[in-house]
C-alpha cells in the first residue's frame, strides 16, 4: 500500500508521539491527521490536527473520520485511582464509539489498538484494567475491518519523547539504569517508541499473521 492516509488518536501521549514521529518521517505516508484534546505543537506539510475538548461526542467530529487507510489508536489513561465504571467509559466506551464510526466509513481500513502486556482476553480476571482492556480488544476484533491489538511491555521513549503521566516519568528515571539489564534478560518484554511506530506502519501496509501482537512481535519489525 502506498500513500497511506493515517488517523492518529492520542498523539500527545508517549506512544502517540513515537507513532507520529515515524509516520511523518515515512515517505510512504501521504497524510497524517491527529485527533485529541490538545494539539501536538508540531508543524509538517502532511500533518493536520483536529482538537476536540469532548472526544466522547463522536458525532461532532465523526464526518471528519472518512477516507483513511489506517487508524492508530494510542489514546489511553492509567487505571490508578479509577473506578471500573470510569475506566470503562474512557477505555471501552470511547474506543468502541470511535471504532464503530470508522468501521462504517472505512470498512477496508486497518485499525491498530494499543493495549498492554497482561491484557485479559477472558474478561474474568482479578485485575480491573486487564479485564476492561480484554473486553475492548474482543469487541474491536468483531468489527468489520482489519483490527490488530498491540500489547507492549516496557516501552523505552526515544528522541526526546516523554510521558505525560508524572508517575511514569519518575518510574522511568528510577529504572533507566536497569533497563539494559532487563532488555538483556528478557529482550522480548522491552520495546521502544520508535519500534512501536514502525511496527504499526508495517502492519497497516502488510498485515500480520496474528491479530494480537505481543512485545516480541512488535520488536520483530
Image (spheres, rainbow, N blue to C red):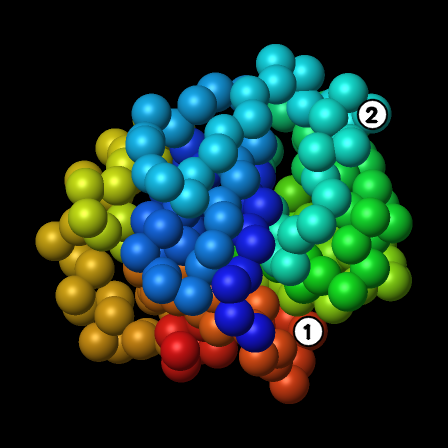
In the picture, measured across the screen, residue 130 lies left or right of residue 72, that is right
**Percent from the top left, x then y, of residue 17?**
37, 42
Total labels: the figure holds 2
Residue nearest the viewer, comparing 170 with 219: 219
Identify the image quadrant of residue 45. Answer: top left
Circle 1 sits on which residue?
A: 211
**Percent from the top left, x then y, of residue 29?**
45, 59
Q: Earlier in the sequence, mark 1 or mark 2?
A: 2
**Secondary structure type for disc 1:** loop
Q: Estimate the spatial distance between the alpha carbons at disc 1 and disc 2, rounded to whole Å.
A: 28 Å
Residue nearest the viewer, comparing 211 with 111: 111
Viewer-nearest of discs 1 and 2: 2
Image quarter (top left, top right, bottom left or bottom right) of the N terminus: bottom right
Circle 2 sits on which residue?
A: 59
Image quarter (top left, top right, bottom left or bottom right) of the C terminus: bottom left
Residue at 62% over, 57% down: 70
Q: Residues within 10 Å of mark 2 (few under 14, many from 20)?
A: few
Q: Are marks 1 and 2 in contact (CB under 8 Å)?
A: no
Residue at 36% over, 61% down: 26
Amino acid at each position: 500500500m502506498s500513500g497511506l492516509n493515517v488517523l492518529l488518536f492520542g498523539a500527545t501521549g508517549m506512544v502517540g508521539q513515537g507513532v507520529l514521529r515515524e509516520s511523518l518521517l515515512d515517505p510512504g505516508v501521504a497524510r497524517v491527521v491527529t485527533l485529541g484534546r490538545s494539539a501536538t505543537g508540531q508543524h509538517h506539510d502532511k500533518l493536520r490536527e483536529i482538537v476536540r475538548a469532548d472526544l466522547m461526542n463522536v458525532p461532532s467530529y465523526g464526518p471528519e473520520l472518512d477516507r483513511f487507510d489506517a487508524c492508530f489508536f494510542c489514546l489511553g489513561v492509567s487505571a490508578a485511582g479509577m473506578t471500573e465504571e470510569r475506566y470503562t467509559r474512557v477505555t471501552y466506551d470511547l474506543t468502541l464509539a470511535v471504532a464503530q464510526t470508522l468501521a462504517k466509513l472505512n470498512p477496508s481500513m486497518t485499525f491498530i489498538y494499543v493495549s498492554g502486556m497482561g491484557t485479559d482476553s477472558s474478561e474474568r480476571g482479578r485485575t480491573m484494567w486487564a479485564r476492561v482492556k480484554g473486553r475492548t480488544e474482543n469487541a474491536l476484533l468483531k468489527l468489520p475491518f482489519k483490527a490488530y491489538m498491540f500489547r507492549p511491555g516496557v516501552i523505552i521513549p526515544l528522541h526526546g519523547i516523554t510521558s505525560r503521566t508524572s508517575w511514569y516519568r519518575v518510574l522511568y528515571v528510577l529504572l533507566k539504569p536497569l533497563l539494559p539489564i532487563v532488555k538483556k534478560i528478557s529482550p522480548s518484554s522491552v520495546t521502544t517508541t520508535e519500534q512501536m511506530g514502525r511496527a504499526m506502519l508495517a502492519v497497516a501496509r502488510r498485515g500480520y499473521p496474528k491479530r494480537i501482537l505481543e512485545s516480541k512481535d512488535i520488536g520483530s519489525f
